[in-house]
Image (tube, helix red, strand yellow):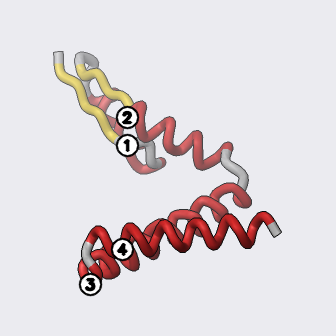
Amino acid sequence: MRAVVTDNEKKMEVMRRELKEASDDLVVYGCSSHLLNLLGDDLTPQQVTSRCASIERIFSNFGVIQTKLWNRLGIQKAAKLVTCYRELRCAIDLD
């Protein structure tokens, strides 16, 4: 028994069909993970996708800033600074 697994792009679907027609003993199917990814893309509203991208950018930028800060100040001083920031932020949010 021989098998071929491809992604689920339209061109690959055509190729799988042609391979199956050329060889009866060949098992041909699309990747389940890729199929679920495509399904998720189709079912996810654009608003959710755009919000996720902006949240991802925030975490990415914060990670770069945090790493630079830690390298410059050291872990203990940076941790104190983060604690001060959080306490000030909470105080502002409560007002």
Q: Mark 3: which secondary structure?
A: helix
What amino acid is at disc 3? Arg
User: Alpha carbon of mark 3 to alpha carbon of mark 2: how far?
Assistant: 46 Å
| Numbered circle sitting on residue 31 | 2
Q: Residue 44: x, y in percent?
A: 67, 48
Residue 14 figure quarter: top left
Question: Which one is earlier in the sequence, the residue at label 1 or at label 3?
Answer: 1
Q: Depth check: 37 or 18 in front?
A: 37
In the displayed structure image, the side of residue 55 where residue 22 appears, left or right:
left
- Kindly identify which numbered label has been placed on residue 7: 1
**What kind of residue is marked 2?**
Cys
Identity of the residue drawn at 32% across and 27% down: 28
Q: Residue at x 59, y 49 (%)?
A: 41
Q: How far apart in space, not on screen, are marks 4 and 1 (Cα)?
A: 46 Å
Q: Earlier in the sequence, mark 4 or mark 1?
A: 1
Residue 3 is left or right of residue 78, and the answer is left
As measured in the structure, the alpha-carbon distance from the residue carrying label 1 to the one carrying label 2 is 5 Å
Q: Residue at x 25, y 75 (%)?
A: 74
The disc, 3 or 4, on the residue closer to the chain's N-terminal end is 3
Separation of marks 4 and 2 at Cα, in angstroms = 45 Å
Q: Residues within 10 Å of mark 3 (few under 14, many from 20)?
A: few
Q: Secondary structure at mark 4?
A: helix
Name the N-terminal-most of marks 3 and 2.
2
Residue shown at the point (58%, 64%) measured from the top left: 55
Amino acid type, residue under disc 4 in the picture: Ala
Q: Secondary structure at mark 1?
A: loop
Crowd band around label 4 with a 10 angstrom C-alpha radius: few (<14), some (14–19), many (20+): some
Q: Which residue in the protein does label 3 denote?
A: 72
> Residue 80 appears in which quarter of the rendering?
bottom left
